[in-house]
Image (spheres, grey):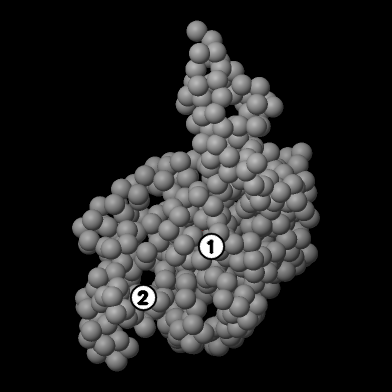
Amino acid sequence: MVAPTISDSDLKLACWDLKKSIYFTRGEHEYSSPRAPLDALGDPSFCLDHGLRYPYVAGAMANGIASEELVIAMANAGMLGIFGAAGLDVSRVEAAMVRLTKALAGLPFGSNLIHSPNEPHTEEAIVDLYLKHGVKLVEASAFMGLTSAVVRYRVTGIYRTNTGVIVAPNRIIAKISRMEVASKFMAPPPVAMLQDLVKRGVISAEQAQWAAQIPMAQDVTAEADSGGHTDNRPAITLLPLMLALKDRLSEQYGYEVPIRVGAAGGIATPLAAAGAFAMGAAFIVTGTINQACLEAGTSDTVRAMLADAGQADIAMAPAADMFEMGVKVQVLKRGTMFAMRAQKLYDLYIKHASWEEIPAAERDVVEKNFLKQSFKDAWISTKSFFASRDPKQNVRAETDAKHKMALVFRSYLGQSSRWANAGEPTRKVDYQIWCGPAMGAFNEWAKGSFLEAAKERRAVPVALNLLYGAAVCLRVQTLRHQGLSVPSSWQNWRPLPELELRSMIERNPS
Ligand SMILES: Cc1cc2nc3c(=O)[nH]c(=O)nc-3n(C[C@H](O)[C@H](O)[C@H](O)COP(=O)(O)O)c2cc1C
């Protein structure tokens, strides 16, 4: 039996106008394409609670790569941008919070609260800063468990209304790839930590009781294989597991408002976004593709390198922030030797008790090609960096030669992402560019469209194309499920220029 077909032009009529339901017949059968407004994608309560128009989040990107410009652009388009606070001095983050609060005048935005096992005081200082400036939403990430800082942020200022509703003004979107960590963020804050906050006078005993009835994070992002820190989990398995966990825990704790789960990792095309929403994601989060956009706080050289990347042009490399723990980050491999060099430094660190113990020939290579200075000179600049950032590290390095070696290696790793952001021409082979397989998928999708050129990539048109394309792809799928044979071009929505796209989105039903 041959499936009834639908022509290009009829399909366009049936799917383009998202606000209009369409009914038609083919032979003996009736088909329908129900309206599917763009702002109804995901869980509508996510947009309602956060004051957004679309369930789309541009996730944090460290060192201000997720810049103020990116956050402002997203907010003005009814989406959520998270400032990339990780790796920045507290004073730089403070300047960003002041600027964003002023520029956005009440429009929603968030900032990153990254777990810093090496620098717990930084985590506390960032929380102090967010509380001081009334930052009401953080994206919490890289946590392996709850810390006193993240709990303090969540419960500060909690109150109960006259009608008995418990309100925690500080919200957390927790980005997580492990189930055991997700369980902690989906649970209420631990009683012992709350009692400690009561003892310290941060909250009252009554506030602690209220806090024990709400989840640490109302929203959890299931982060699959992504750029930067990642466990490389496949989205197609991680998201259903996280959704099942939130159902179980929402029921177990009897929350009045169920937890929501969003999806991140690999979302770079309308089909990927459609897949995430079809699986039940309340919202979607992108990262890698935003670094390739003009608003990102990086260099044009990096944008051009990203525009050339294919899906396999990525590698895992040791991370600067959790180097000694063996944690890795996903980076661009094409056009830079960073991944290889960082791995070499990690191998040397694991194998040797001190810099001096490394064979002379290997030390030569590291000094000449990686550090481009003697280890001694590299230690002088490393020491002065830590003197202001975290002096305890220097004290420990004085008696612990292995730690001293780690600090110098971490300093190279840290600088390598700054060289990339600044487009430092003499250090191109050392560029550390966090990047996931999403980049290759995006480049392939953008090929031949206005988004192919790096200089045309802007975060809002990219996001709107993903959302609109996802809605069209989902609609096309409903027709396929009714037994229609659909031209394959329609299952792969191509990018539309912003003006055309906006007119499609704003279009009213006739
Ligand atoms: C350049 C870059 C830097 C990132 N830095 C951070 C960060 O500092 N904090 C964080 O929570 N996530 C960070 N991420 C992760 C993103 O916020 C986002 O969750 C992730 O990129 C989504 O997956 P994708 O890369 O496949 O789009 C970074 C991602 C990239 C590409």
Asked which quadrant contains residue 103, the reply is bottom right
Q: Is the C terminus in the top left, top right, bottom left or bottom right quadrant?
A: top right
Residue closer to the observer: 29 or 208: 29
In what element is the residue under mark 1? loop
The location of residue 67, given as percent across then percent down, is 64, 69
Outermost residue on the front side: it is: 510
Amino acid carrying label 1: it is Leu
Q: Which mark is residue 335?
A: none
Amino acid carrying label 2: it is Ala
The location of residue 38, given as percent across then percent down, is 56, 48
The location of residue 418, given as percent across then percent down, is 66, 69
Mark 2, Cα crowd under 10 Å, few <14 / some 14-19 / many 20+, is many
Residues under numbered marks 2 and 1 in contact, where contact means CB atoms less than 8 Å apart: no
Above-or-below relation of 153 to 305: below
- Disc 2 marks which residue? 168
Q: Earlier in the sequence, mark 2 or mark 1?
A: 1
The residue at 51%/85% (across/down) is 133
The residue at 25%/52% (across/down) is 248
Residue closer to the observer: 246 or 374: 246
Residue 361 in view:
no
Q: Which mark is residue 52?
A: 1
Residue closer to the observer: 411 or 353: 411
The residue at 27%/82% (across/down) is 207
